[in-house]
Image (cartoon, rainbow, N blue to C red):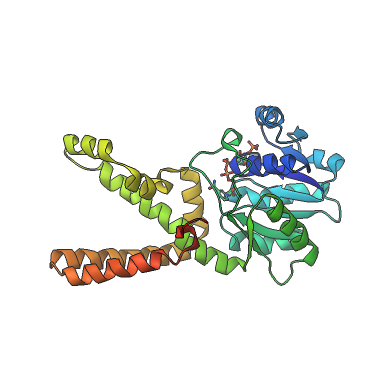
């Protein structure tokens, strides 16, 4: 299969590396000639260009739009003159509702996708062929989605070593608000709270003592600001609803501690210990 990737950043670059490694013919489009040179040097693509018009010559069966979320629909619009009638298009954006229906109206062979893997760094220099191995890769068909788009995307998901998960864009956005977007806001607040410790000696000591617990809870808040902003702007309702729920729990914890109601806090922590194990990602690896 011939695959074109538009936007050779962390996600686009990682997909390109893996697909090339698996023997697919991968072509890259970047706004930046230097990124193209890097992609070629890494062996991520077999050809790369800075003009969307180059797609016509490569005639890909699949185009993956791996730009920031705001650029997915403008990029698709700009691509339209260069797509052949059978070309399937997908994106990798972390929010699906604002994208999937308008994109399908623009191009009926569109299907939304979201590989659930990332890093705190961006750009092709951070790309890894195995970034998606064992991770969920969400596909979000709607009633208008053509079956052949799903066949091609399922092949892609399998080839990058991911686990396909099907849901609709609205459910996707509500679920990722809980496990991806809310954690970014919580983690960012944690970093800010610690950093605002007024005693410089305590702050320095806290930084020195910070170990795996702080690293785990602060990691996503210390990531790329643009991604957090993207989540909040485009998944606003779900993020707001989840922030409110989270604040209620924090408030409850504060009350238990203030009133020294240790039974309440203890039962709560016992319950969260049980619930934590319900997430497959927290279960012991075989
Ligand atoms: P990234 O490393 O910054 O890559 C994005 C790439 O998009 C850039 O390298 C750039 O490629 C291109 N781009 C940037 N601004 C553009 C613009 N104005 N117009 C056209 N192209 C532009 O970011 P990423 O982490 O790969 O994120 C890309 C997409 O993946 C986003 O939609 C995000 O929601 C989604 N996503 C991210 C993660 C994550 O954790 N990072 C996880 C899952 C999904 P060129 O310089 O080559 O043009």
Residue 247 at x, y = what percent?
Answer: 31, 64
Q: How many marks?
A: 0
The quarter holding residue 128 reads top right
The quarter holding residue 127 reads top right
Residue 29 at x, y = what percent?
Answer: 72, 38
Residue at (69% x, 28% y) in the render: 33
Query: As rendered, which of 193 and 262 lies closer to the eye?
Result: 262
Q: Residue at the left extreme?
A: 259
Say whether residue 108 is left or right of residue 188. Answer: right
From where the camera sits, is residue 90 visible? Answer: yes
Residue 117 at x, y = what percent?
Answer: 55, 50
Residue at (58% x, 32% y) in the render: 125
Quick check: which quadrant has ligand 1?
Answer: top right
Residue 146 at x, y = what percent?
Answer: 78, 66
Residue at (48% x, 61% y) in the render: 177
Query: As rendered, which of 34 and 211 lies closer to the eye?
Result: 211
Say whether residue 261 is left or right of residue 267. Answer: left
Q: Height in image: 191 above or below 170?
A: above
Residue at (70% x, 55% y) in the render: 158
From where the camera sits, is residue 236 visible? Answer: no
């Amino acid at each position: 299969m011939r695959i074109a990737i538009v936007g050779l950043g962390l996600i686009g670059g990682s997909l390109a590396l893996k697909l090339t490694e698996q023997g697919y013919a991968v072509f890259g489009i970047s706004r930046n000639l230097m990124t193209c040179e890097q992609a070629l040097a890494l062996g991520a693509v077999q050809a790369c260009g800075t003009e969307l018009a180059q797609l016509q010559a490569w005639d890909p069966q699949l185009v993956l739009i791996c730009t920031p979320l705001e650029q997915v629909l403008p990029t698709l619009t700009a691509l339209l003159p260069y797509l052949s009638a059978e070309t399937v298009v997908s994106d990798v954006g972390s929010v699906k509702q604002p994208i999937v229906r308008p994109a399908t109206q623009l191009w009926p062979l569109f299907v939304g996708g979201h590989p659930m893997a990332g890093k705190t760094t961006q750009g092709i220099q951070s790309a890894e062929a195995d970034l998606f191995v064992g991770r969920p890769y969400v596909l979000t068909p709607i009633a208008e989605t053509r079956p052949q788009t799903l066949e091609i995307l399922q092949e892609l998901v399998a080839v990058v070593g991911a686990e396909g998960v099907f849901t609709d864009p609205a459910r996707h956005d509500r679920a990722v608000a809980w496990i991806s977007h809310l954690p970014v806001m919580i983690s960012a607040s944690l970093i800010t709270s610690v950093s605002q410790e007024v005693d410089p000696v305590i702050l320095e000591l806290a930084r020195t003592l910070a170990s795996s617990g702080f690293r785990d809870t602060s990691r996503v808040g210390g990531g790329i600001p643009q991604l957090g902003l993207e989540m909040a702007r485009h998944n606003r309702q779900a993020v707001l609803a989840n922030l409110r729920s989270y604040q209620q729990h924090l408030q409850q914890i504060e009350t238990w501690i203030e009133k020294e109601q240790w039974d309440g806090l203890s039962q709560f922590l016992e319950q969260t210990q049980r619930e934590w194990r319900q997430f497959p990602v927290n279960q012991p690896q075989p």
